[in-house]
């Protein structure tokens, strides 16, 4: 049960600290969606790349619980943890220069250790444009 709590905590943390790159002018909402896709694939390297500079260290700390021992370990984790973010919606609430707010709402599903759980999400997250790429940049991260 403690392992499932870690998974749920990680997913909720990720929901609050979403960060992503918009890629080709897709906008702030596309950036948030790209980050959640990386999260659903447990692509830690991509998640770090898509995190704003101000929160990069915090996001690295937050996901360090997944380990970084190598590709084989990450593949084993991907087999243990299934994350479905297809039920989430992304809406740009405001855009002003290099700053935006994206509302992420809907349900995502976590499967781990033979258990499945749906989580409801309704969060507004800040997104910034750094070097021409949109990245969500939430504050208040553990360790940040």
Image: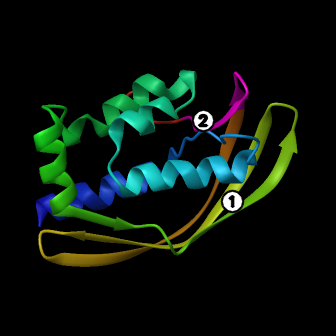
Instruction: State how the image is colored.
Output: rainbow
Instruction: Tell whether 64 sits left or right of 16.
Output: left
* Residue at (60, 35) in percent of width and height: 137
- Residue under pointer 2: 137
* Residue at (38, 28) in percent of width and height: 143
**Where in the figure is residue 118, as x and y percent of width and height?**
38, 77
Tally of numbered tags: 2
Residue 44 - label: none
* Residue at (43, 49) in percent of width and height: 38
The reply to whether residue 42 is in sight is yes
Instruction: Tell whether 29 sits left or right of 105.
Output: right
**Where in the figure is residue 132, as x and y percent of width and height?**
73, 27
- Residue under pointer 1: 103
Callout 2: helix, strand or loop?
loop
The reply to whether residue 142 is in sight is no
* Residue at (49, 54) in percent of width and height: 36
Callout 1: helix, strand or loop?
strand
Instruction: Tell whether 92 sits left or right of 75.
Output: right
Quarter occupied by residue 99: top right
Q: Quadrant of the C terminus?
A: top left
**Where in the figure is residue 5, as x and y percent of width and height?**
22, 61
Give the CA distance from mark 2 to mark 1: 13 Å
Q: Which residues are magenta?
A: 129-139
Q: Nearer the viewer, residue 43 or 52?
A: 43
Q: Quadrant of the N terminus?
A: bottom left
Assess disc 2: are there few (<14), some (14-19) or many (≥20) residues with their C-alpha within 10 Å of its C-alpha: many
Extreme residue toward the right, this view: 96
Q: Nearer the viewer, residue 36 or 144?
A: 36
Instruction: Tell whether 117 sits left or right of 105.
Output: left
Magenta stretch: includes residue 95 = no
């Amino acid at each position: 049960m403690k392992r499932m709590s870690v998974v749920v905590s990680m997913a909720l943390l990720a929901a609050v600290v979403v960060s992503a790159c918009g890629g080709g002018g897709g906008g702030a909402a596309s950036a948030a969606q790209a980050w959640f896709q990386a999260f659903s694939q447990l692509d830690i390297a991509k998640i770090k790349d898509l995190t704003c500079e101000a929160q990069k260290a915090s996001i690295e700390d937050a996901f360090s619980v997944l380990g970084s021992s190598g590709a084989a370990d990450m593949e084993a984790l991907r087999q243990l943890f299934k994350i479905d973010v297809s039920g989430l919606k992304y809406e740009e609430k405001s855009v002003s220069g290099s700053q935006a707010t994206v509302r992420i709402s809907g349900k995502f599903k976590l499967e781990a250790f033979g258990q499945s759980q749906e989580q409801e999400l309704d969060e507004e997250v800040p997104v910034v444009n750094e070097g021409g790429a949109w990245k969500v940049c939430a504050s208040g991260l553990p360790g940040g």
